[in-house]
Amino acid sequence: MDVLIVDDDQPTGLYLQHIISEIPGINVQAVVTSGEEAIRFTRKQKPQVIFLDIDMPGMSGLEVARTLTDLYSDLIVIFATAYPNYALEAFEVYSFDYILKPFDEDRIRKTLTKISSALKGRSSAATCGTEIIPVQSQGRTYLLNPDEILYIESWRTNVLIKTIRCELFLKGNLADWAQRLQRFGIIPSHRSYLVNINKVREIKRSGYTYNIKLYSGENVPLSRNCAQQFKKLLGK
């Protein structure tokens, strides 16, 4: 796992490098001292994880995180700072963790071990033909397996993604998610719903209305316009 450290205080950055370098499987690519350097380095070397100080001359760590996560949605950001008062803003830019100075070495090891396990899971899923999608929900980054999605529901300017494990509220509209997930068999069942066709147990009709019953036991609306497509896909 490739890591970049960004801290305007070089001795602090080197100390963090020393801690991280002792963890098996972790490669610290570089220690840089400014946000501008961090952006240039990331564009060239593509680290998987970046440790960011927040209070730096020039670009702050928050500005760097916003810039880089817009460019690389799968980049994992960990803030490493002496200031606890930035925590809320940090999670608004979808950081994975917020570690305070002086550093707790055990906390850093646990965080990186958790990330390493998640990245191995992503790699394993890719080998098996399943794509893992990083998504941001309530200030946290989650690794979403499309195969685990049951349905997606539109909530005004947000969407609710219901999986076999949890519920996630995400920014965005249903049309964008439909386009993104169609190849996984997640398709519109209604103007406000997308459904994973592989999780459909049966289609039920009551008068002029339809419903989809999922293997999870939940029911999802099925519009008359979408009913024929579902029946065809299910061989009904």
Image (cartoon, rainbow, N blue to C red):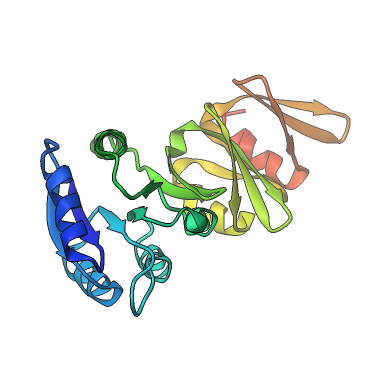
Q: Is residue 145 left or right of residue 33?
A: right
Q: Residue at x 48, y 31 (%)?
A: 148
Let me know if residue 116 appears in the view: no
Q: How many marks?
A: 0
Query: Residue 34, percent across and down?
Result: 26, 73
Q: Position of residue 200 (x, y in %)?
A: 59, 27
Above or below for 47 versus 56: above
Q: Residue furthest right?
A: 207
| Image-based side of 210 in relation to 69, left or right | right
Identity of the residue furthest to the front in this view: 102
Q: Residue at x 28, y 55 (%)?
A: 51
Q: In this rendered view, identify the residue nearer to me: 7 or 167.
A: 7
Q: Residue at x 29, y 33 (%)?
A: 110
Query: Residue 46 in the image: x percent, y percent?
Result: 21, 61
As displayed, is residue 39 above or below residue 213? below
Quarter containing the C terminus: top right
**Picture quadrant where residue 25 is located:** top left
Q: Residue furthest toward the bottom?
A: 58
Pick the front one: 2 or 85: 85
